[in-house]
Image: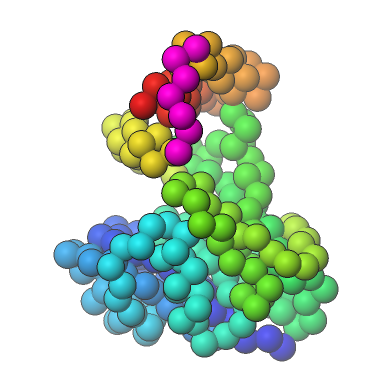
Amino acid sequence: MHKLSVVIITKNEQEFIVEAIKSATFADEILVLDSGSIDKTCEIAESLTAKVLHQDWLGFARQKNLAIELANNNWVFVLDADERITPKLQAEITSILESPEADGYQVARLNNFFGKTIKTCGLYPDYSVRLFDKTKGAFNDVAVHESVQVDGKVSKLKQPMIHLAYKSVDEFITKQNYYSTLNPRKKNTLKALLNPGWTFFKLYVLKLGFVDGWQGFVIAKLYAQYTFWKYIK
């Protein structure tokens, strides 16, 4: 049985960190790498027996890679504070680690927007590598939307994790505006004018966003707005 470290990077996550850590208590180690929280994130994490370390912000990829490097075990699961490992996913991970047949495993995310679980708008299964042998993988060093690159075989887990994506429209707008600023794309006025309409049509019609009522409409509209921002900035 391979030992597992769950790593979480944080800054002012007191609202989310309790349930994130509780969902990871099956692991042999929970490591929290904090980048300057001024709320009770660190105290809460330590009270739940997580190992808490500190590092000034390096950027998403570098911060996560450092957390992975600091973990005691080769097998790691990278968890965000607003994500939850379900009991069924716990059981699957535990079974996998008895005798892994791959070097990394993609995990689906079941996203919750504005209080509703969303499977339309192209938001599910939303696979990404989260469970992997750190001697075989690491995050690519990009400004935003970083992902784990594995030098070896990658498989998929059957069970999803939960992602509490956005509680409110205001939060969604603020974060997407921030991500569009980090996005390294060159300014392209033509794409800024044309691509948002296609993005909305794709998510709301082709990806069945209309099935999810007002939430589906708002998600499609705001991703269209994000498309505009990332090409106009």
User: What is the basis of the colouring in this image?
Assistant: rainbow
Farthest-out residue, right: 101
At 38% from the left edge and 81% from the top edge, which residue is drawn?
Answer: 50
What x and y, as percent, mark residue 77? 57, 70
At 75% from the left edge and 58% from the top edge, which residue is drawn?
Answer: 156
Q: Name the quadrant of the C terminus.
A: top left
> How many numbered tags mark residues here?
0
Q: Is residue 122 above or below residue 93?
A: above
What x and y, as percent, mark residue 20? 43, 65
What x and y, as percent, mark residue 13? 30, 60
Q: Which is more toward the observer, 105 or 162?
A: 105
Question: Which image quarter: residue 31?
Answer: bottom left
Q: What span is colored magenta in the figure?
A: 184-190
At 51% from the left edge and 74% from the top edge, which residue is drawn?
Answer: 68
In the rendered view, does 84 fall on the left or right side of 182?
right
Question: Which image quarter: residue 189?
Answer: top left
What x and y, as percent, mark residue 147? 58, 54
> Mostly what secondary structure, the magenta segment?
loop
Q: Is any part of residue 85 visible from this angle?
A: no
